[in-house]
Amino acid sequence: QVQLVESGGGWVQTGGSLRVTCAASGRPFGSYAMGWFRQAPWKEREFVVVVNWSGGSTYYADSVKGRFTISRQYGKNTVYLQMNNLKPEDTAVYYCAASTDYSGNYYSTDFYDYWGQGTQVTVSS
């Protein structure tokens, strides 16, 4: 089992920055990949970024590439999503997720076994 708790969401103006955090517990932190998804009102949950178990590989959605950065800190069992140059279309509930698979469609929600409760990010124009 893996428990995930997000924090750090909030409100920011266009062009601003936020960092959201996901604290993990349960299974050894290095035994699963970690991803971030987001879900805007009336839309499906969409892939944002994933980092593999070692932290050595990351994959970003085109919509956030160059603006968002994922990192994982093993000593604190925490994953961070640094979001810069935010746009109104980034407004959503952001979820972190964990996958015990080592290969697969990481951009699909089906790849992930565990989910956090989500944190709201609102970007005003």
Image (cartoon, rainbow, N blue to C red):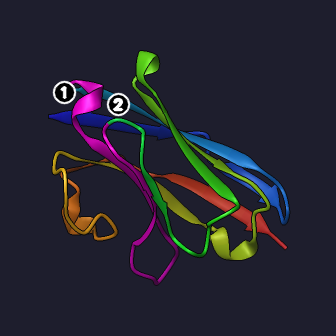
Q: Position of residue 95 (x, y in %)?
A: 43, 54
Q: Is residue 46 magenta?
A: yes
User: What residue sits right under mark 1 in the picture?
Assistant: 27
Q: Secondary structure at mark 2?
A: strand
Depth check, front residue: 4 or 103: 103
Q: Is residue 94 magenta?
A: no
The amino acid at mark 2 is: Ala
Above or below, comparing residue 74 to residue 93 in the picture: above
Q: Position of residue 117 (x, y in %)?
A: 37, 48
Depth check, front residue: 117 or 79: 79
User: What residue sits right under mark 2 in the picture?
Assistant: 24
Q: Is residue 40 left or right of residue 96?
A: right
The amino acid at mark 1 is: Arg
Q: Is residue 119 left or right of residue 31?
A: right
Q: Residues within 10 Å of mark 1 (few under 14, many from 20)?
A: few
Q: Position of residue 41 (x, y in %)?
A: 51, 77
Above or below, comparing residue 72 to residue 94 in the picture: above
Q: Secondary structure at mark 1?
A: loop
Cα separation, mark 2 vs mark 1, equals 9 Å
Depth check, front residue: 94 or 109: 109
Residue at image position (61%, 50%) is 69
Picture mark count: 2
Quarter of the image containing the C terminus?
Answer: bottom right
Residue at image position (34%, 30%) is 24
Depth check, front residue: 85 or 116: 85
What are the residue bounds of the magenta stretch?
27-53
Residue at image position (67%, 76%) is 89
Q: Is residue 27 left or right of residue 97?
A: left
Q: Residues within 10 Å of mark 2 (few under 14, many from 20)?
A: many
